[in-house]
């Protein structure tokens, strides 16, 4: 059974940093591109970042470029999202998601972790 | 950026009804349109990918159709467990979600 478990969320002040982790199990992690997607009541669902199987290719939405870094450790079956210079508009539930093997939809999602950016 | 317009935003239907939800892309996205179901307090779950392919374990009452810019999710006979919010996603160029359709029982 595919499982994705996020951790690392919480309350953080604007301008500070936070690092999310996503532990994967139930599949060969190194064979799949991975992603982070966030959700808020006002903006809905937004793709945030994606990373290729080996970590050599990364992609970001414009609003987080230069502030967020996606990475992965295939030996630990874990992906990460380092979030720096956080803003109030980054407040959201962040989901870890797996890309499909042949095409880039998101076929499995974690339960999500809440990130609140507030002073 | 590609915009996805989903309609209706809210939908009330009875058990056994045929339900349709629509998604319109701001430009041609070929077949790269997916549908997700999100129940309250849960993560989104993939139902349909690439317009009309049913994801593993999804009941056959769910189906998808469309091409180019206009797409439809159909539930052939609504069941109580289908109460949820449904989202479309285009993955032709980047990834953009629709605004969601909240489906309730009448």
Image (spheres, helix red, strand yellow):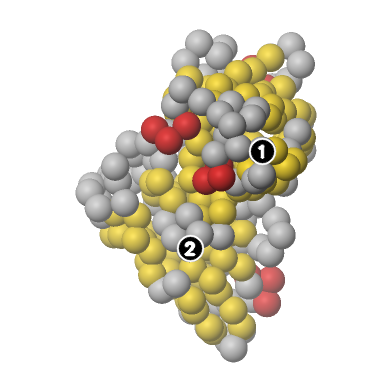
Q: Position of residue A34 (x, y in %)?
A: 58, 28
Question: Circle 1 marks a residue in which chain?
Answer: A
The part of the image, by quadrant, that contains residue A62 is: top left
- Residue at the image position 31 percent from the left and 51 percent from the top: B3
The local secondary structure at tag 2 comes to: loop
Residue B24 sits above or below residue A2 on the image: below
The part of the image, by quadrant, that contains residue A55 is: top right
- Whether marks 2 and 1 lie on the same chain: no
Q: Position of residue A97 (x, y in %)?
A: 61, 37
Whole-number angstrom distance, CA of label 2 to CA of label 1 = 30 Å
Query: Looking at this view, is B45 or A76 the one in front?
Result: A76
Q: Nearer the viewer, mark 2 or mark 1?
A: 1
Query: Looking at this view, is A73 or B15 the one in front?
Result: A73
Quadrant (top left, top right, bottom left, bottom right) of the N terminus of chain A? top right
- Residue at the image position 46 percent from the left and 22 percent from the top: A66
Specify whether A94 is left or right of A5: left
- Residue at the image position 68 percent from the left and 64 percent from the top: B40
Could you classify mark 1 by the number of other residues whose Cα lies within 10 Å: few (under 14), some (14-19), or many (20 or more)?
some
The part of the image, by quadrant, that contains residue B95 is: top left
- Residue at the image position 66 percent from the left and 51 percent from the top: B43
Q: Position of residue B87 (x, y in %)?
A: 49, 58
Query: Looking at this view, is A63 or B56 the one in front?
Result: A63
In this view, the residue farthest toward the front is A119
Quadrant (top left, top right, bottom left, bottom right) of the C terminus of chain A? top right
Specify whether A65 is left or right of B57: left
Q: Position of residue B70 (x, y in %)?
A: 29, 59
Q: Which residue is mark 1?
A: A13
Residue B84 tag number: none
Q: Which residue is mark 2?
A: B100
Can residue A9 be seen in the rendering of this structure? yes
The local secondary structure at tag 1 comes to: loop
Can residue A101 be seen in the rendering of this structure? no
């Amino acid at each position: 059974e595919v499982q994705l478990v996020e951790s690392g969320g919480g309350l953080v002040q604007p301008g500070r940093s936070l690092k999310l982790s996503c532990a994967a199990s139930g599949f060969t992690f190194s064979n799949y591109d991975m992603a982070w997607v966030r959700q808020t009541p006002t903006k809905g669902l937004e793709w945030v970042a994606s990373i290729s199987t080996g970590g050599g290719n990364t992609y970001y939405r414009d609003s987080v470029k230069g502030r967020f870094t996606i990475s992965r450790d295939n030996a630990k079956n874990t992906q990460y999202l380092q979030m720096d210079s956080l803003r109030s508009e980054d407040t959201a539930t962040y989901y870890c998601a797996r890309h499909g093997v042949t095409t880039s939809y998101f076929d499995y999602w974690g339960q999500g972790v809440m990130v609140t950016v507030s002073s | 950026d590609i915009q996805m317009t989903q309609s209706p935003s809210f939908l009330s239907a009875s058990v056994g009804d045929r339900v349709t939800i629509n998604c319109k892309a701001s430009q041609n996205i070929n077949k790269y349109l997916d549908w997700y179901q999100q129940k309250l307090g849960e993560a989104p779950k993939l139902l349909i990918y690439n317009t009309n392919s049913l994801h593993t374990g999804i009941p056959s009452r769910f189906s998808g159709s469309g091409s180019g810019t206009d797409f439809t999710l159909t539930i052939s006979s609504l069941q109580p467990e289908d109460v949820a919010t449904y989202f479309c996603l285009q993955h032709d160029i980047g990834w953009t979600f629709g605004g969601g359709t909240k489906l309730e029982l009448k």
